[in-house]
Amino acid sequence: MQELSSRRVLTQWPMDDTQNMKLYVTYGSPYARLARIIVIEQALEDRVEIIQAKTRTPGSPYYQINPSGRVPYLVDDTGVGMEDSQLICAYLDGLDGKPCFHSAAHASDWAYLRLEFAARSMCDGIAVWGREMARPESERSPATLAHELARAQRMADYFEDRVTDPLVQGRPAMAHLERGLGDLTASRRQLASWMRPISNIPSMQRTAPP
Ligand SMILES: N[C@@H](CCC(=O)N[C@@H](CS)C(=O)NCC(=O)O)C(=O)O
């Protein structure tokens, strides 16, 4: 995990006439979490201001910033905005030309991409779950919640079976940062021991959902 823990020292940024980048997030969003992890891992905390956005709220001032209303959303230091965690993570990771979690080889490595998108599918489950839980209790759909819990368990079984895959054991990339709904390691011994060192790194700990 050494690639995840040591990052470069930041020097003299922003310059006087340069503004910080702004990363709009919610703290429960699994997509925003990925971008927040990259900010920490790439030692960009002095350059990227993290701002909590008010999503799913009629008339939210955030809609003036990002019309889609989704997070994450990054406004770069020239004022240009971009959305979607994949784009934002690739952008932030590559800012200094030395990306930690992206590589040209992965972009056409179908085996790696299958792994990454399977892991990403778990983020979608967290997003649906979070959306449901944000509703008043009486309006939550037990069927939707149960569906997402069951999906998360199936995905965890899939990853438990794949833990020994060299891609899973290999150098951490975006696929390794994705997490599922709740603690999926109970009774999944291999998954638990694979996840422990990654889950313990400061960027994962500091971005854990509330
Ligand atoms: N594909 C997008 C998905 C972003 C997304 O759906 N974010 C959710 C939070 S997990 C959101 O902002 N929801 C607010 C809304 O739907 O208005 C990404 O990867 O960034």
Image (spheres, rainbow, N blue to C red):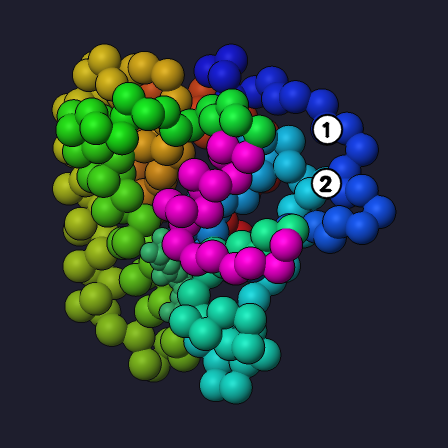
Quadrant of res 189? top left
Looking at the image, residue 72 sits to the left or right of residue 46; the answer is: left
Image coords of residue 16 (percent x, y): 84, 47
In-front residue for pair 37/97: 97
Instruction: Tell me if residue 74 can be seen.
Output: yes
Image coords of residue 87 (percent x, y): 40, 47
Looking at the image, residue 37 sits to the left or right of residue 179; the answer is: right
Q: What is the three-letter code of the residue carrying label 1? A: Leu
Image coords of residue 58 (percent x, y): 48, 85
**Residue under the point 47% across and 57% down:** 82
Give the CA separation, mark 1 to mark 2. Answer: 8 Å
Residue 10 tag number: 1
Image coords of residue 114 (percent x, y): 17, 33
Q: What is the three-letter code of the residue carrying label 2? A: Asp
Q: What is the crowding at mark 2: few (fewer than 14 residues within 10 Å), some, or many (at least 20)?
A: some
Q: Residue furthest bottom?
A: 59
In this picture, is 114 found above or below 66? Answer: above
Quadrant of ligand 1: it is bottom left
Q: Which residue is mark 2?
A: 46
In-front residue for pair 48/209: 48
Looking at marks 1 and 2 on the same chain, the residue that comes earlier in the sequence is marked by: 1
User: In this picture, which residue range is highlighted in magenta?
Assistant: 78-95
Q: Kindly check if marks 1 and 2 are in contact, taking CB atoms under 8 A apart as contact.
A: yes
Please count the marks in the image: 2
**Residue under the point 39% across and 54% down:** 84
Q: What is the crowding at mark 1: few (fewer than 14 residues within 10 Å), some, or many (at least 20)?
A: few
**Residue under the point 28% across and 26% down:** 106
